[in-house]
Image (tube, rainbow, N blue to C red):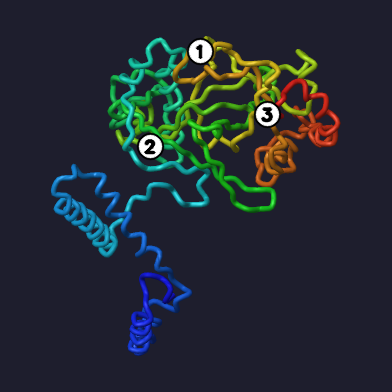
Amino acid sequence: MAKLHMHTDETLKLLDDMMLHALGDYSASIRNFGTTDSYSTEPGELEHRTSKARYCQMDRKEFVKQMASIERHEACILSIQDKELLQGAAVEEEVATSPEAHFHVRKSQNFLENIPLFLKQHAGDPAIKDFLPKLHHFLLAKTKEILTKEGGLLHTDDSTAISHTGVTPACLDSEGRAFIKADRMYKHNVMRINYTTSDIHQAQDVINPSTPHCNVMLLGRNEEDSSMDQQHPYLYARVLGIYHVNATYVGPGMVDYHSHRVDFLWVRWYQHIDKSTSLCWQAPLGAIHFPPMVEPDAFGFVDPDDILRCCHVIPCFAQGLQHLDSRGISHCAQDKLDWKSYYVNRFVDQDTFMHYQWEMGVGHVYAHATQAGSEEIPDAAGVQALDNFEELEGDMSGCGAGF
C-alpha cells in the first residue's frame, strides 16, 4: 500500500498505532454491533445518495437550507410514526397479510374515480355500455350477501318489506338497491390471489391489468339449459381494472345505512370456440376468443372470491390479429392488439394442469360437490390429452408458431 500516492510508510505506521490504541474498544463494539462479518459498512458509504436525491427536489438556491428543511420534515414524520407505535395505535396496513384470505387488495383510497365523470370521459366506448346498471346489479347481490353473513339483514317477505325502522319508503323495488357512496370507485393496480399447490403449499398469483398477468379463470356454470360457454367447467376473462366501492344497501330487511366495502374486477369475457369448427382445434388445448363488443355480456364484473387462479393464454398466431391496422375501437378494452383466437395453456404448470383433472386437485372442493354423474363433465379425457400432447405438438405448429 505504500506504493499508492495516498499512503506512505509514515502514514501506514500511524495507522498501525491507531489500531493498537483502539484495542480497548473492540470488545464493546462487538457487544453493540456484533463481529465485523455480521454487518456491512455499505449503508454508510452509500449515504451520499440520500443528499443527492434531496438535491433534485430543490431549486439550487440556498440548497443547504433547503436540504436541512427536508431532513427535518422527514425526521418529524418518523417521530410521529414511532409515537403511534409506542401508544399502540393501529397502523393501517397497505396490503392484507392473512394467509386465510382468498385475495389481497390494498386498503388505500388514494386513486379515486368519479363514476359519472368516468362514464362521460369514455362516452361512446363500447366497453362502458350498461356499465352502471351492471355495476348496481352486481353490488346489490354482493351487499346482500355481506349483510346476510354479518346478520345485518332482516328476513322479511314482500308484504312487510318496508315496514321496518330505517327502511326508506322511496325504495319501491322489492329486491332493494345498492347505492355507491359519493359516486366514487377506487382503483388498484395489483390484486393477489392465494391458492393451494399440489404439494400442499401456499402460493400466490398476481393480477395486474397493465401487464400480461391479467387473465383469470373462474368456475363455470353447469346447467341443463346453459349454453356451450356455461357447460365448460371453467370461464376465462381478461381483467380491465381492479376497484372497490363503499356501497349501502337500501331495501327490504335493511337495518341501517352503514356502507360496506365491496371489491370487484371489471373484466372482458372470453368465449369458448367449438372445436369442430376447424381442424386447428383438434389439440388438447382449449380455444377461446373475444366475442363482439356489441354483445350484452361481452363485459361484466367479477367477485374476487370467485377467481380460482390466473391462467396462461397463448395467441394463435396463425389466425392473425383482429385489427390489421392496430387500431382498436375501445380505449378501455385496449383491443388494438387483440388476436382472433387464443389457446388456454393447461400445461403451464402442474397446479394448473390439476384443475383439469376433475376431483383430483388439492383443495378443489367445488369438484367434490358435483353430482354423481361427474364423468359427464367436459374435459374428462384430460389425462389422455397429456399423453397425446407430444404427439400433437408437431401438428399444432402450423396453428400457433409461438406455442
User: Which label lies toward us, 2 or 3?
Assistant: 3
- Whether the residues at callouts 2 and 3 have beta carbons within 8 Å, the answer is no
Q: Is residue 370 above or below residue 351?
A: above
Taking 126 as reference, is 45 above or below it? Answer: below
Report x, y in % for residue 362.
69, 47
For residue 319, side relative to residue 9 (left or right): right
From this view, report whether residue 168 is shown above or below residue 93: above
Q: Which residue is mark 1?
A: 327
Helix, strand or loop at disc 1? loop
User: What is the number of the mark on residue 204?
Assistant: none
**Residue pointed to by mark 2:** 261
Lower sequence index among marks 2 and 1: 2
Q: Position of residue 93 (x, y in %)?
A: 37, 50
Q: Residue 188 falls in which quadrant of the image?
A: top left
Lateral position of residue 342 relative to residue 139, left or right: right
Disc on the earlier residue, 3 or 1: 1
Q: Nearer the viewer, residue 338 or 202?
A: 338
Residue marked by disc 3: 344
Q: Along the polypeptide, which appears first: circle 2 or circle 3? A: 2
Estimate how packed mark 1 is, as few (under 14), some (14 to 19) or many (20 or more) residues with alpha carbons within 10 Å.
few
